[in-house]
Image (cartoon, rainbow, N blue to C red):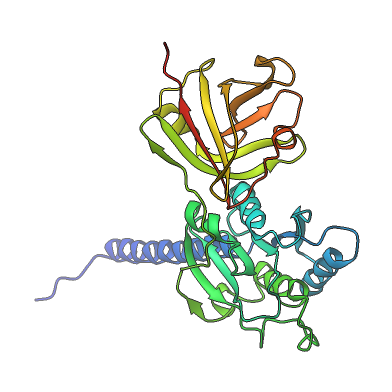
Amino acid sequence: MAVQMSSGSQIFFILKTALMQLKKFLLVIAIAFIASVNAQNKTVVFQSDFGLKDGAVSAMKGVAMGVSADLKLYDLTHEIPAYNIWEAAYRLEQTVTYWPAGTVFVSVVDPGVGTNRKSVVVKTKTGHFIVTPDNGTLTLIATSLGIAERREINEVVNRRNGSQKSYTFHGRDVYAFTAARLAAGTISFEQVGDKLSNDVVSIPYQKAMKEGNQLKGNISILDIQYGNVWTNIPAEMVEQIGLKYGESLSIQIFHKGTKVWEGQAPYCETFGAVAKGKPLVYLNSLMQLSIALNMGSFAEAFHVSSGSDWSISVHTIEKK
């Protein structure tokens, strides 16, 4: 004989079932909302080697606003030295993580514009998007943030109308247009184009490493306003060799393997710890080993620059 539920039990069962369905529905909505926020937060950040003397940057922003007037457009920098792909790679690594997940970056340092280099959008493992030629610009981001997915821009659909015969301004016609469509939610990341492997074009450079009491690394960039030399050697490695404030380091700087400068400098907390014009070693704002002259330009004084072909070696000095 079948057991019948009381009317109270039936109501409880119905309410419990309805509540479970509501929870599932809300979970689906929440996941969709989070994915939406991470994929399209209506923010686009531009960098290039265009400078601001002409209308190139304004043209890119105009194209973006033509896609959606709701977009928020910002500049990372447009003062990258002409054709300097390495510096484009560095400026992305320097700044991307300070922006919310879902932000779309446009990086246009493109000496190969119009050639067969790939135009791509990558999604990093931190949830940021970068629209760029795959020419080495993604070298550092690929290592530090990781590439979650890379897609080649389908220029048949993701290109500014009427620009098909323009071969020298992909920053305006392809990258700004695609970035704006992605940021505005006009297209999904999957609609950018075909999925590629995550192996980006990479520029060779000296990675930070420790060998006994010696540290080796790359001179990634100059703190250009002051001429300080910034390396990719992290604070953690400095700690590993037991270096204390006030102790001196022996330093060698190389360009393409040829020694450019050799000397010693104390490891200090701040510039004023040494006399004016004297060298020091310190941790910069990114917590990486750097070299400076107090109130002077180390780079200018010793003819030091930065880039993938500049390297540095430092080691502790044994106490007598």
Q: Position of residue 175 (x, y in %)?
A: 70, 72
Q: Quadrant of residue 273?
A: top right
Nearest the camera: 103 or 293?
293
Q: Is residue 173 above or below residue 38?
A: below
Residue at 66 percent across and 57 percent down: it is: 88
Between 268 and 185, the residue placed more toward the observer is 268
Task: Say which residue appears at 73% left-offset and 21% top-offset.
Answer: 277
Report whether residue 30 is seen: yes
Please state if 134 lies on the left or on the right of 222 as rendered: left
Whether residue 99 is visible to the viewer of this picture, yes or no, is no
| Residue under the point 45% across and 73% down | 197
Q: How many marks?
A: 0
Q: Of all residues shown, which one is farthest toward the top?
A: 320
Residue 185, how many percent across, how many down? Answer: 65, 71
Q: Is residue 172 left or right of residue 182?
A: right
Q: Quadrant of residue 168?
A: bottom right
Image height of 57 relative to 281, above or below = below
* Vertical order, 2 against 127 (above or below): below
- On the image, the x and y values in percent for residue 54 come to 91, 64
Q: Quick one: which residue is furthest to the left in this view? A: 1
User: Which quarter shows the N terminus?
Assistant: bottom left
Toward the front, the furthest residue is: 258
Choose top left, top right, bottom left or bottom right for residue 230: top right
Can you say whether 115 is above or below 14 in the image?
below
For the C terminus, the quadrant is top left
Counting from the top left corner in percent of width and height, residue 48 is at 74, 61
